[in-house]
Image: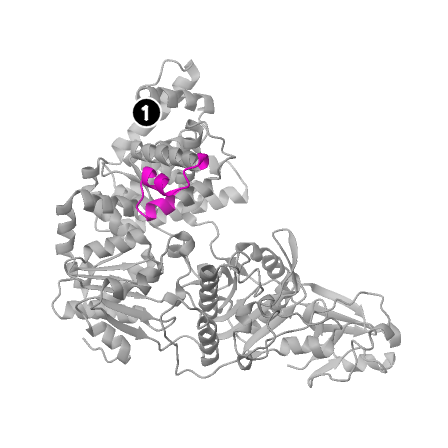
Amino acid sequence: MKLDMLNPQQRKAAETLNGPVLILAGAGSGKTRALTYRVANLISTGVEPWRILAITFTNKAAKEMQARIVELVGDKAEDVWVSTFHAMCARILRRDIEKLGYKRSFSIYDEDDQKSMLKNTLKSLDIDDKSFTIRELKVRISDAKNRLLTPDEWFRESAKDFRCQQIHDIFTEYEKRLRSANALDFDDLLMRTLELFADHPPVLKSYQQRFSHVLVDEYQDTNYAQYKLVNLLTQESRNLCVVGDDDQSIYSWRGADMRNILEFEKDYPEATVIKLEQNYRSTSNILDAANQVIQNNQERKAKKLWTDAPEGELISLFCAGDEREEAAWICDRIQQLQLSGEKYSDIAVLYRTNAQSRVLEEMLMRAGIPYRVFGGVRFYDRKEIKDIIAYLRCIVNPSDDISLRRIINQPKRSIGESTIRELLLFAEKDSVPLYSALMDVPDTLSARPRKCVREFGELMGELVALHETVSLSEFVDVLIERTGLRAQYEKDLSDEAKTRLENMDEFLGAVREFEQAADEPTLENYLENVALITDLDQAEIGTKHITLMTVHSAKGLEFHTVFIAGLEEGVFPSGRSILEDNRLEEERRLCYVAITRAKENLYISYAMQRMLYNQLNMNALSRFVDEIPKGLIDDAWISKREQNFPEEEAKPQPAHKQSEKKQSHKPLTFGVPQIVTRGAGIGARSSALGIKGVKKGFTPSAAAGVPASALASLFKVGDRVMHKKFGEGNVMDIHGKGSDSRIVISFAAYGIKEFALCIAPIVKVND
């Protein structure tokens, strides 16, 4: 196999086959290529494909990696275990989970199932759901499981107060209910696998002997449970290769522990360390900016990205008066990019928090710019799809009370809440699943509810029998028809109902695709495949719209043009992180990730005041912008304000710099934009719109001393102008004479506006 397509460091990564290896791979440095060639090289040098385990963080990445390896060494590469942590553990547990007292038909609960289970747990313990949010309980339990703590072990580490005692009781009951339902949540997949290895050493031994080489991608994002898994699997071989970038560790809030990568050499003193620092994505200016920002972090491994690419454009920086003006500017820039040939799909707008998208969406809609918010409702989270999946899960695992409770009256079949409560009491009394109450209907129910429950039980019994005799796709098709799931929407003529029917058809298409591609196209395997799909697996960047997303969601993606909105103290970095060094360093890593998503063009914006979370704040420029050398930034947008719309107010400095008397370099500080109100006379704004000091290429519209009759000659239809409040726009029309002259301007996000030419706060832009 030829390795000459790799650069020297990539080649070293592909050729260092034995012993522990740490590959520090900077953003856009071709780590996937190096990892793929390494696996292919292992196979080419005689390692059996089935003895190689490669772990990625998304199913999509796993499929892409396997396909690339097949291209390099042929079909034998299909025997390589390329998998996510959760999929790997699910595969191990399907084989041996009976040793832990579960059935192999266990359900894997998603976030909604987990929420339902926790709500039911609170009710059963008679704990007011106002005392705890479901989100808090999920985070607490997930954190405990990621640290491999049982409820009792968690409590021993806690403050042991009354609240912690309640959480312990909820955690304990939650675990009891999961086991009763023969179900695992996502964190259980890892924890139960480690429990299996600890309690049954021969099982661990078999996997240690099977996998002679283990590779882990995105190692900086691993938590303690994942760290333990790879540590155990490679305990004998020591052939562990991890790839990652500590500068892109941004998931501590969900359990990721950056120490796993920073302390790899402590765990493996004999490790070979390889740095991939050549970037193949971004221009030199963008990389220099990213390097200058991230070097301010203390907890990191020394490395510096470099590229053979040209310097490229400077980073554009815009100071907005508020979030609406910021969004208007972004819209206008997007329109100009699109007119110059840029595709919408090559553009992304990034922000720190989801709440920032609201104003951006409003402005994009006004401007007629198609967009898609990344991280919206997942296909498999849509109600009609979750209903189908709940039916399928009950067929496979009748003990799954959460799924059964979802569908028992879906579609409506006159089985109300009082009837369900009666069935639950009957099941709890005999310590049996709710499904048993369908087969043996309690006498306490009156005639009509008993009839409805019995009919539903008969339907489920028929479906259970049918699924053993027909193909997967045929069974799903019949189930949708027989249960009435399709019929309930066919009666509804609304657009929403039509969309739900289309989603059902799409689901059937997905089932058929799985059936054609899978080695074992069983219902059980299909449900496992669906359960392990994450948000990132469903991420598809469309060709006809721009993408809006948080910076966290953007990791792993790249765009020709990137806008980063809201670079302000208290927004990015977040207010909660400013006083804690470790959290501030993670915010800086997040900024580094945002910058390195851009290939050619990077636009950064901030607002002098912002309404966010229903609070109006005056925000200083983010320290992260101040950390970018001034020579890398094009501040023409700021210059327009300073030179054409000067202010009397003092220019604000970043909050973290205000107390410093001396600085190593001049910080980027910019004026506050003034909103000029209607009715102000020419004399009142003669200083604000004076010709003196105007930057070359910009013409004031209402300069002192310019006769009103001459103003119309300054502009013509098609000119680009900038308005104090509405940003940039195109002149559509000029009419009237003298002091009655009017100018009509089309703005990207504010539509068409008409002004009295003699007092319009506009300047001409000569692009």
Quadrant in the picture for residue 479: top left
Residue 735 position in % (x across, y down): 81, 73
Q: Residue at x 41, y 27 (%)?
A: 124
Q: Could you tell whether 4 is left or right of 402 in the image?
A: left
Q: Residue at x 79, y 68 (%)?
A: 755
Q: Nearer the viewer, residue 366 or 562?
A: 562
Residue 209 position in % (x across, y down): 12, 55
Quadrant in the picture for residue 1: bottom left
Q: Nearer the viewer, residue 369 or 550?
A: 550
Residue extent of the magenta highlight: 141-163
Q: Could you tell whether 95 is left or right of 590 in the image?
A: left
Residue 423 position in % (x across, y down): 38, 22
Q: Nearer the viewer, residue 80 or 622?
A: 622
Q: Please state which amino acid type lies under the numbered disc 1.
A: Glu
Question: Of helix, strand and loop, which one carries label 1?
Answer: helix
Main secondary structure of the magenta stretch: helix
Q: Nearer the viewer, residue 452 or 322?
A: 322
The C terminus lies in quadrant: bottom right
Residue 147 magenta-drawn? yes
Q: Residue at x 23, y 48 (%)?
A: 91
Q: Which residue is mark 1?
A: 458
Residue 535 magenta-drawn? no
Q: Residues within 10 Å of mark 1 (few under 14, many from 20)?
A: some
Residue 148 position in % (x across, y down): 30, 46
Q: Could you tell whether 508 is left or right of 468 in the image?
A: right
